[in-house]
């Protein structure tokens, strides 16, 4: 672990913190058991999602999500693709999130509440006057 000395105190540099990585499809593993397909992240023992054959229609499959819900029926290729996409989205969502009060969001909110000036304000006033005259 790298340390820097600043004003008499020791602190951990940003370079020594573990960077957040994006998980790709190559990190996912499919295992078949009892006629179902289980999708795992690396060597984790808990499946991310399960692809199950439909009980009524042969050759059709459904995705069982972690909350117990089932998807619509699709063929096996589409079920595996959708299950992989769902798993990757759930694995990669945390590193990419930004705080809701970040500086960019604050700037956008402030700009939305500022009165319009220039060309946009003139266009709005003209439109309102036209509506009053017509209406």
Image: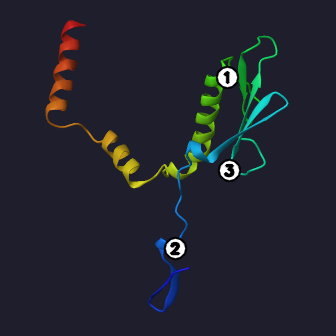
Name the residue tied to disc 3: 42
Mark 3 neighbour class, 10 Å CA radius: few under 14, some 14 to 19, many 20 or more? few
Q: Secondary structure at mark 1?
A: helix
Give coordinates of residue 107: x percent, y percent: 34, 49
Q: Residue furthest bottom?
A: 8
Residue shown at 64%/32% (left/top)? 83
Q: Answer above or below: position of 10 versus 83.
A: below
Instruction: Left or right? Give the position of 62 relative to 6.
Output: right
* Residue that badge 2 annotates: 16
Total labels: the figure holds 3
Q: Against 63, is 39 above or below?
A: below
The numbered dot on residue 68 is none
Question: Which of pointers 3 and 1 lies earlier in the amino acid sequence?
Answer: 3
Which residue is found at the position 72% from the left and 20% from the top? Answer: 61
Is there a contact, CB below 8 Å, between mark 3 and mark 1? no
Q: Is residue 78 left or right of residue 54?
A: left
State left or right for residue 116 relative to residue 17: left
**Crowdedness of circle 2 by 10 Å Cα count: few (<14), some, many (20+)?**
few
Task: State the residue position of label 1.
Answer: 76
Residue 125, by quadrant, is: top left
User: Element at badge 2?
Assistant: helix
Image quadrant in which the N terminus is located: bottom right
Toward which corner of the image does residue 35 lie, by quadrant?
Answer: top right
Are circles 3 and 2 on residues that touch, CB within 8 Å? no
Q: Residue at x 60, y 29 (%)?
A: 81
Q: CA distance from mark 3 to mark 1?
A: 22 Å
């Amino acid at each position: 672990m790298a340390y820097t000395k600043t004003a008499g105190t020791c602190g951990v540099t940003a370079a020594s913190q573990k960077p957040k990585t994006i998980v790709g499809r190559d990190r996912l593993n499919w295992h078949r058991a009892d006629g179902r397909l289980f999708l795992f992240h690396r060597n984790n023992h808990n499946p991310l999602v399960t692809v199950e054959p439909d009980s009524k229609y042969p050759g059709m499959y459904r995705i069982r999500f972690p909350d117990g819900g089932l998807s619509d029926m699709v063929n096996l290729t589409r079920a595996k693709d959708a299950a992989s996409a769902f798993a990757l989205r759930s694995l990669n969502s945390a590193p990419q999130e930004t705080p809701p009060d970040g500086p960019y969001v604050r700037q956008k909110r402030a700009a939305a509440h500022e009165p319009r000036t220039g060309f946009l304000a003139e266009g709005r006033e003209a439109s309102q006057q036209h509506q009053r005259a017509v209406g």
